[in-house]
Amino acid sequence: MPVTREQDIRRRAIDATRDLAAEGGYDSVQMRDVVRLSRLSSATIYRHFSSKDHLLAATHLEWIAALERSGAARPDGANAAERVCAILRDTCRTMARHPRLTAALIHALGSSDPGVGDCHREINRIMNTMFRTALADEVTNADEFVHLLGIAWEGALFSWAFGRMTMTEVEHTICRATHLLLLGTTTEAGTPP
């Protein structure tokens, strides 16, 4: 299938953004450098992306979409907790291999830019789908679990991005939260876990 002009523009702008963020983090992504690396005009880039944060959020969305297409989105495991934790572990370890890029992507997700919000919603939709698949039919209130897990994970990642946790601590914390949330969802109401 041939690549459309719009797809080519998005690809070139996102590739340039990813390369800049991977090399120097959030502050190194400057629109003039995205223009130079992508060989696109600033007017062309701004027709597709409202800001630097929107570009970074779109880069994050592409990474999550690639994760969804990979085998990591369908991990093996004896139960829901093992499968969900496998997704989280793989994701955390990939993020840890690219710390400047990861920190830039997380930083951008805190922006109030509407384009960032659109990307963030799509990232959440993809992750929610992966988690629901990992849960299979083992959890009666999957929506609540996924919602609470998403809040815990996002909080842990922001803590990492601002230097308050290591990625190993993020991984441990979010897998522990997974086990605690799943234990709570499989316990009878009124019965302590």
Image (cartoon, rainbow, N blue to C red):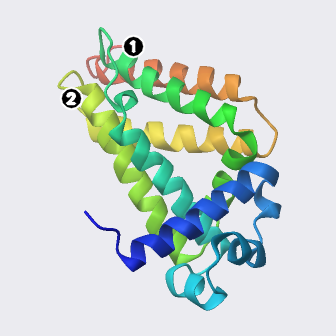
Asked where in the image residue 82 lies, by quadrant, the reply is top left
Residue 139 x %, y %: 24, 25
Tell me, yes or no, if residue 181 can be seen here.
no
Residue 132 x %, y %: 28, 35
Q: Residue at x 21, y 26 (%)?
A: 136
Q: Quadrant of the N terminus?
A: bottom left
Q: Which comes sooner in the sequence, label 2 or label 1?
A: 2
Residue 131 x %, y %: 34, 34
Identify whether 113 is placed above or below 101: below
Q: Residue at x 42, y 40 (%)?
A: 67
Furthest-bottom residue in this view: 43
- Which secondary structure lies at badge 2? loop
The residue where tag 1 is placed is 192
Residue 115 x %, y %: 51, 74
Foreground pick, 63 / 170: 63
Foreground pick, 2 / 25: 2
Tell me, yes or no, if residue 15 can be seen here.
yes
Q: Residue at x 74, y 45 (%)?
A: 161
Q: Amino acid at mark 2?
A: Thr
Q: Quadrant of the C terminus?
A: top left
Foreground pick, 125 / 144: 125
Identify whether 157 is placed above or below 28: above
Nearer to us of marks 2 and 1 is 2
Q: Which disc number belongs to residue 140?
A: 2
Q: Amino acid at mark 1?
A: Pro
Rate crowding at label 1 as few (under 14), some (14 to 19) or many (20 or more) other CA atoms within 10 Å. few
Say whether residue 83 is left or right of residue 97. Answer: left
- Which secondary structure lies at badge 1? loop
What is the distance, in whole Å, between disc 2 and disc 1 at their CAs?
17 Å
